[in-house]
Amino acid sequence: MRQQETPSYDPAVNDASNITGQLAQLLDAGGVISDPERIAPMQRDHRALYRGHALAVLAPADTAAVTRVLAFCNEHRIGVVPQGGNTSYCGGATPDASSSQVLLSLARLNRIRGIDAANYTITAEAGCILAKLQAAAAEADRYLPLSLGSEGSCMLGGNLSTNAGGLNVIRYGMARELVLGLEVVLADGRVLETLTGLRKDNTGYDIRSLFLGAEGTLGVITAACIKLYPALRSFATAFVAVRDPAAAVSLLGALREASGDCVSSFELIPRIGVEMTTRHIPGVVDPLAAPSDWYVLCELSTSRANEPLDALLEQVLAKAHEDGWVQDAGVAQNLREREAFWRLRESIPEAQRKDGASLKHDISVPVSQVPRFIEVAGGWVAHHVPQGVLIAYGHLGDGNLHFNVNQRPGTDPVVFRSRQPALQRAIHDLVAEMGGSFSAEHGIGQLKVAELERYAQPAELAAMRSIKQALDPNGILNPGKVLRGSAL
Amino acid sequence: MRQQETPSYDPAVNDASNITGQLAQLLDAGGVISDPERIAPMQRDHRALYRGHALAVLAPADTAAVTRVLAFCNEHRIGVVPQGGNTSYCGGATPDASSSQVLLSLARLNRIRGIDAANYTITAEAGCILAKLQAAAAEADRYLPLSLGSEGSCMLGGNLSTNAGGLNVIRYGMARELVLGLEVVLADGRVLETLTGLRKDNTGYDIRSLFLGAEGTLGVITAACIKLYPALRSFATAFVAVRDPAAAVSLLGALREASGDCVSSFELIPRIGVEMTTRHIPGVVDPLAAPSDWYVLCELSTSRANEPLDALLEQVLAKAHEDGWVQDAGVAQNLREREAFWRLRESIPEAQRKDGASLKHDISVPVSQVPRFIEVAGGWVAHHVPQGVLIAYGHLGDGNLHFNVNQRPGTDPVVFRSRQPALQRAIHDLVAEMGGSFSAEHGIGQLKVAELERYAQPAELAAMRSIKQALDPNGILNPGKVLRGSAL
């Protein structure tokens, strides 16, 4: 396998203002962003882990303009960092500080190109904000299941480039599984286009899937054709006190079976999640009378109108209570109660931030292994990080936990933070031992490049590098993200 | 992009018996098949389009033996043609006639490695017959949705290597969407293994998906971890006379919505399909009293026990009758009637064979475009192939039609067959114009290599070639399949 070469500048364009001037000529009036107040937040990541400085911040108006920028940058060996809503958790969309990379905002590619209700598809551009697409689908009496905390600001291109997960994965799969077609600009400016919304097409290799989750390192997604589903008309939502995580896994199986696989969310929440949100977030109250070590927030949904899903849910919960899995449960009686349950779940990250420093891990294991993982990893934390308190919550239905450790009040923040490397190593080693993933839904970005090198199989890493070399031989696309040794 | 080189033999092993002897030493006693009666059917394809002659026919007992064979063949530039149940429709598993390629049967890798009911997964080897896996899942009270005509003889490795479709795609997706992990032996014998059954794992490129549908040209799949679903407990099946294909599309939407997306099959059948099967297949009868130009065989299913899906189906059909979409319908009253409906649908290919010569096309278009496609393409056939009669049937729910033309009784077979090139060109051109696929579920194999070259976008074909080069630099894997210029 050939080693990725670090490209050097073409001397003819090695002068920054000269390059910027040439790039500006490829774009319309709004194509170069120079206002420092607009640029500043684009050069920082969402979590304030990274701060970069770009050679130029570009915002092409359409796919043709993206192709011109990439062809130019490829010819002149200039790194290109694509950015959508800038909500990466791993610094995936932040340029480095070298002032030599172009920051490429896709925000102006924000058109919905069409909805084909009979084909159950929506075709939209990379810069569309996810919530806008959900609303457009709803207007056509269809349902777009991709849903995550940042849906009010994240953009489709980023969702697909990071293969976003979110709240409905158990029923509808990751972002990758929702994609029927893509328009991608390759490193050299050529366009791959498969937007026609086919559900079956076995004509050669699944090139498309490579771009989904590649974080902009193999091509720039400019548009996509996404699967839609029948609009949902009936819901049932419960906040359930469960005996332990094993009981939660059993309840999940029972609910899937009894509901005809209508479980659209199944979230595990520890007691401390309830305590933190009720303490820090105005309006959040504990839904149940007596405290419990573990809770599940679950939701059933269907496109059938007037379906008595709440009765079905109550039946399953009553049986689970008899079986000892469930201690108590509240089934939402109206929209307000449903929203209150969800508000508790969705404000855990904010409550964590308000509570103080935290060390985060976005891991997954097989669903059946979640209880053992929590027991063993939780034991490690209790023993080795006495300054911290564990908050393990998240998408149990997908085996995906946000396994976070918050600083215990009154402990030394420096000592707490100093435990980070050992904690991360222990957690990720245990994840690897149990066949899990050290990055279940947040991706690699620049934050987890070393973890990927450590935990990927050598043959897998070599295959990734050879594919990077094949599709981006000059290494201009999002250099240094996902794979090292591709810095420009 | 570098051109794929045609490798030449290593002189040291250029003697066939020498090579065979060395290969035999890599395997156990059952590892070399030499009985001519066993070899003969393995060297022909299922449809008798191709007849090859292999250098050796090998049947390794396990993954380690596969790695030894591939490492040897890669070193000595010997082509390897993987074969499972040998049910390819495109000659994808048949060696060429040069006596220089190794035929690699995966049939002895036939172990089910495990079922994790709580994780809803089954892990099994490439040589497992699909029906055996379905039965094993059912024994664990789980459902494996992959289902196709050849399930009694096709094998998992082939199903995945061809990204098989089948009867349940509308609800559960293609084979690719059911795969959570793979064990793949790469061209040089290294093993990529991701069998742990994770539902979320965003750690780098989706290498895995490349092997699904690559027809053994990028690696040899030796095992996989497949998603399971709750066992199905209630069904409703109807044979419906519809006004026309557009009415069928409308009925599909209405059924998806009213049933809570419980439609697991939705098959379009033309009148001639009913006529041919009742004429040629003993026991098949026309389910409805009056003839209709078009029919739909649809099935709802759910894991809910005692769910009155038939009442729901009858309700939707009654409303569709009022709306003029449906002329008549029979809802199966018992298992025997359900099986009779399915027998009619599934015996269409056999009836076609008994009826005479046929010219076949496995195409897809967006679901919403199916009516227009049938009208325009059907018109072309009527006008330009008067010797033929159109039988367009198949998976309407996925936009996938088996668009076949049978020889009209009493016409000249030579004249009929001579129309094949013009017919195929017209059909595939129209498919391309409507954004469709010339190979919806059967793949490329050796039959459709030229079609892929004609209809793929140049950038797409170039990307495929560069990926082939990256993962199989010596071009030893299934040479000449999918991509040309890789013949060994």
Image: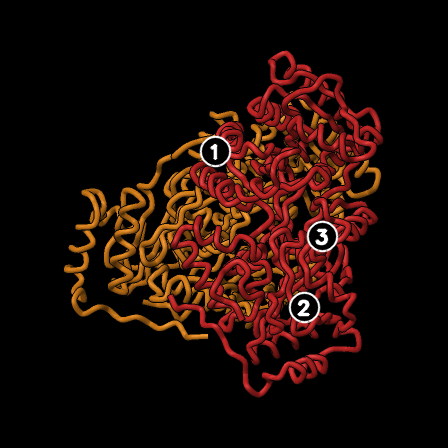
Chain colours: A orange, B red
Q: Given contact means CB atoms under 8 Å apart, are the residues at marks 1 and 3 in contact?
A: no
Labels 3, 2: front one: 2
The x, y position of residue A155, in whole percent, is 41, 43
Label 3 sits on residue: B121
The x, y position of residue A103, in whole percent, is 30, 54
In the rendered structure, the answer to whether residue A382 lies left or right of residue B231 reads left
Query: Above or below — where is A248 with respect to A143?
Result: below
Query: Above or below — where is A200 with respect to B154?
Result: above
Co-location on one chain, circles 1 and 3: no
- Chain at numbered mark 1: A
* Quadrant of the image occupied by residue B28: bottom right
Badge 2 crowding class, 10 Å Cα cut-off, few under 14, some 14 to 19, many 20 or more, is many
Amino acid type, label 3: Thr
Amino acid type, label 1: Gln
Badge 3 crowding class, 10 Å Cα cut-off, few under 14, some 14 to 19, many 20 or more, is many
Q: How many marks?
A: 3
Badge number at residue B104:
2
Looking at marks 3 and 2 on the same chain, the residue that comes earlier in the sequence is marked by 2
Label 1 sits on residue: A134
- Chain at numbered mark 2: B
> Which of B431/B40 is in front?
B40
- Chain at numbered mark 3: B
**In terms of secondary structure, where does tag 1 sit?**
helix
The x, y position of residue A329, in whole percent, is 72, 35
